[in-house]
Image (cartoon, helix red, strand yellow):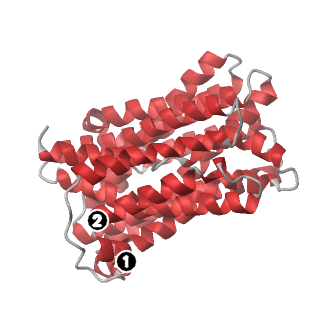
């Protein structure tokens, strides 16, 4: 294996835990039962709050990178994930402590999230096709991590929801591979405030379009996470499953995501800028079909289709934004991560908003979400040419 492939493998192994927060979504009913005095919104935030602190970690990356270098920053983040991700398995008597561990977990992921995307992209700057495939693989490995962790959660939750948090030990695989395969990087010469100066250096027109697209991504992610939060309640409402089956649905999403990531290079070559409207339409269709399914195997298949659709959207944005020049690409990567993680964090409040409008049942809520996805598909198809950054 040549040096570049070893570096890619190390970076991909670290990506296994980037999208790990939803892996414990199936635990929500059990956690709620263990802490009956805690509001349902805070219970849901237990799944999504890491995303908010990922944003904090993203902004701290430049400061930590300046002091430690890229490799040690990634190692530090992975170690934090291993320690605080598994903490609920050892200390689980106080909800406040568990909530804090989830916050620090997100901080750890945020330290290396942007670095992984940038370093994977940088490995293949000499070829747009290879870069699209590498970014697709990065997304695929996020999905692979979700598959392994979610299936493991589904089995461990049969013993206790506390033990299910041991799945975050998978971060140690990335720690070892990064330690041995990723070469030492020179410490960043940028100032600690580098991320703030990006807003000045990036071309105003490019920056404005990136912000608009990031806002769209915020909505898409917020809607997608609703499915993760509502799939177990949907199964309970329909009387066809429980937390273990809910965990299997999330695993189905991850399997679809893994397949999508592996195929993204070919998908982008065929669809190009129509990746986004096509994926949004498929996501909406699969969500609506899930609400009327009465079969567990069919629902798993539909969940896989949703994962496939969604995991075409994320690498599309990554590829689109990292195709810009250096400063704009770094600004774009940061904007993507902020939009993605804000969408994840505030998804429970999306649910509250729908509930306020009288959309309370999981089936009805997910039907509305599916319709909105199809609406996004129509709008992005109509205004398709405006999505390309080069056309401003």
Count of marks, rendered view: 2
Q: Quadrant of the N terminus?
A: top left
Q: Which residue is the extreme one toward the right? A: 37
Q: Which quadrant holds residue 371?
A: top right
* Mark pair 1, 2: CA separation: 11 Å
Q: Is residue 329 above or below residue 21?
A: below
**Mark 2: which secondary structure?**
helix
Taking the image as drawn, is residue 329 in sight? no
- Asked whether 292 or 118 is in front, the reply is 118
Circle 1 Cα neighbour tier, 10 Å, few/some/many (<14 / 14–19 / ≥20): many
Dot 1 lies on which element?
helix
Q: Horizontal and vertical percent for residue 237?
A: 80, 29
Q: Position of residue 113 (x, y in %)?
A: 40, 58
| Position of residue 380 measured from the top left corner of the image (x, y, whole percent) | 45, 48
Instruction: Return the residue nearer the eye: 12 or 270.
Output: 12
Which tag, 1 or 2, sits closer to the chain's start? Answer: 1
Residue 326 percent location from the top left of the image: 22, 68
Res. 191 image quadrant: bottom left
Q: Which residue is mark 2?
A: 70
Q: Residue at x 80, y 46 (%)?
A: 32
> Which residue appears at 67% of the width and 26% of the height?
245
According to the image, label 1 marks what residue?
63
Rendered image: mark on residue 141:
none
Q: Is 353 placed left or right of 256 in the picture?
A: right
Given residues 29 and 173, the one toward you in this image is 173
Q: Residue at x 56, y 52 (%)?
A: 85
């Amino acid at each position: 294996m040549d040096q570049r492939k070893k570096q890619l493998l190390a970076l991909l192994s670290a990506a296994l835990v980037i999208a790990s927060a939803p892996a414990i979504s199936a635990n929500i009913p059990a956690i709620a039962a263990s802490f009956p005095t805690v509001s349902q919104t805070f219970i849901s935030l237990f799944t999504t709050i890491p995303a908010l602190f990922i944003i904090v970690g993203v902004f701290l990356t430049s400061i930590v990178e300046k002091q430690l270098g890229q490799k040690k920053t990634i190692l530090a983040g992975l170690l934090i994930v291993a320690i605080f991700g598994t903490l609920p398995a050892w200390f689980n008597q106080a909800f406040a402590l568990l909530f804090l561990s989830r916050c620090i977990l997100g901080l750890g992921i945020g330290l290396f999230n942007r670095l992984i995307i940038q370093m994977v992209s940088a490995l293949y700057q000499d070829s747009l096709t290879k870069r699209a495939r590498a970014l697709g693989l990065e997304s695929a490995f996020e999905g692979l991590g979700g598959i392994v962790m979610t299936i493991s959660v589904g089995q461990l939750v049969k013993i206790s929801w506390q033990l299910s948090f041991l799945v975050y030990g998978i971060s140690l695989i990335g720690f070892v591979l990064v330690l041995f395969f990723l070469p030492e990087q020179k410490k960043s010469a940028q100032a600690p405030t580098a991320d703030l100066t990006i807003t000045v250096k990036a071309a105003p027109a490019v920056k404005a379009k990136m912000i608009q697209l990031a806002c769209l991504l915020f909505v898409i992610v917020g809607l997608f996470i609703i499915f993760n939060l509502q799939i177990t309640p949907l199964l309970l409402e329909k009387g066809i499953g429980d937390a273990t089956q809910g965990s299997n649905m999330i695993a189905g999403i991850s399997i679809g995501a893994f397949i999508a990531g592996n195929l993204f290079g070919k998908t982008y070559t065929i669809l190009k800028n129509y990746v986004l409207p096509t994926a949004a339409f498929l996501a909406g269709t699969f969500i609506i079909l899930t609400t009327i399914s009465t079969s567990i195997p069919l629902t798993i298949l539909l969940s896989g289709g949703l994962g496939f659709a969604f995991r075409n959207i994320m690498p599309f944005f990554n590829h689109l934004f990292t195709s810009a020049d250096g400063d704009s690409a770094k600004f774009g990567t940061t904007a993507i991560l902020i939009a993605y993680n804000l969408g994840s964090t505030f998804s429970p409040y999306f649910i509250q908003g729908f509930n306020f409008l009288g959309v309370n049942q999981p089936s009805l809520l997910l039907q509305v979400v599916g319709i909105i996805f199809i609406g996004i598909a129509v709008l992005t198809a109509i205004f398709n040419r405006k999505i390309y950054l080069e056309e401003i």
